Amino acid sequence: MPELAPYLEKLPYWKDLSAEERDFVRENASLPFYPAGSVIYGSSTACLGMIYVVRGSIRVFFLSDEGREVTLFRLSPGDSCVLSASCVIEEIDFDTQMAVEEDCDVLVVRPNAFAALAERNIYVRCYMFEDATERFSSVMWVMQQILFARFDQRLASFLLRESARLGTDGLRMTHEQIAQQVSSAREVVARMLKRFAAEGLVSMSRGQVTILDRAGLRKLL
């Protein structure tokens, strides 16, 4: 497990804390490990606190009563988020889920401690609302895509973004995993990928989609 101290210094508001406040954070922070596939925050779990991703990847999504998932954004190493401390921010009255995609080490500042910091330190409070605003902007972009973009555009955009993020044209993802990311049904994803393959934009093998024609995918956008 990584040492806690070096990652405390990476918190966006660390430099604006007093020596006493830094000691307070040290006493109320932890660095838990979460394996891939686990849900670390959701409607059925206790308020987690403010998080900073040290290693791994987390998917943040809505889950409907019917079990449909709408992916909102992802957290990668170096990202922090306050939505997992929504009990601290009274203005947040919607539930999100956080699922681990890749094994994670996450720096967690306990919710009561984070609330106390935000109450006494204006820089922490500003960070809290700036982060919430940034995440809300991501949610609005996703809603725009779902409501107004054609599905072929949404899928092409996702494939290109994921390829850029991973640095490879070969994406090891099942149709079900892609459907979760683009907020659609597996059958819809399968049909569109089959069309993309017929047009020479991608090739498919078991558990993998490989981009063959980036320019062709960009034209769809």
Image (cartoon, grey):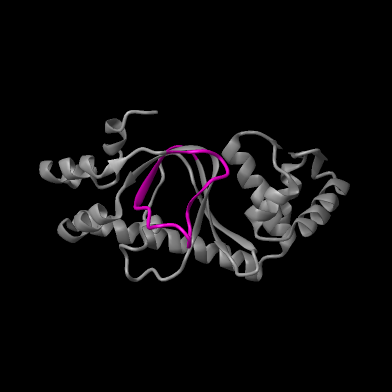
Q: Quadrant of the N terminus?
A: top left
Quarter of the image with the C terminus is bottom right
Instruction: Give the residue drawn at x 60%, y 70%.
Output: 65
Q: Measured from the top left, where is residue 75 in percent x and y?
A: 48, 47
Q: Position of residue 153 (x, y in %)?
A: 70, 58
**Identity of the residue drawn at 80% across and 55% down:** 192
Does any portion of residue 221 appear in the rendered image? no
Residue placed at 57% from the left, 67% from the top?
143
Would residue 152 appear left or right of 7 to someone viewing this image? right
Q: Is residue 54 magenta?
A: yes
- Residue at the image point whose x is 68% and y is 47% from the top: 159
Q: Is residue 145 magenta?
A: no
Q: Is residue 1 visible?
A: yes
- Residue 28 position in % (x across, y down): 24, 45
As drawn, is 71 to the left or to the right of 95? right
Segment tinted magenta in the rendering: 33-56
The image quarter in which residue 38 lies: top right
> Residue 2 or 203: which is nearer the viewer?
2
Q: Is residue 15 left or right of residue 72?
A: left
Q: Residue furthest right?
A: 198
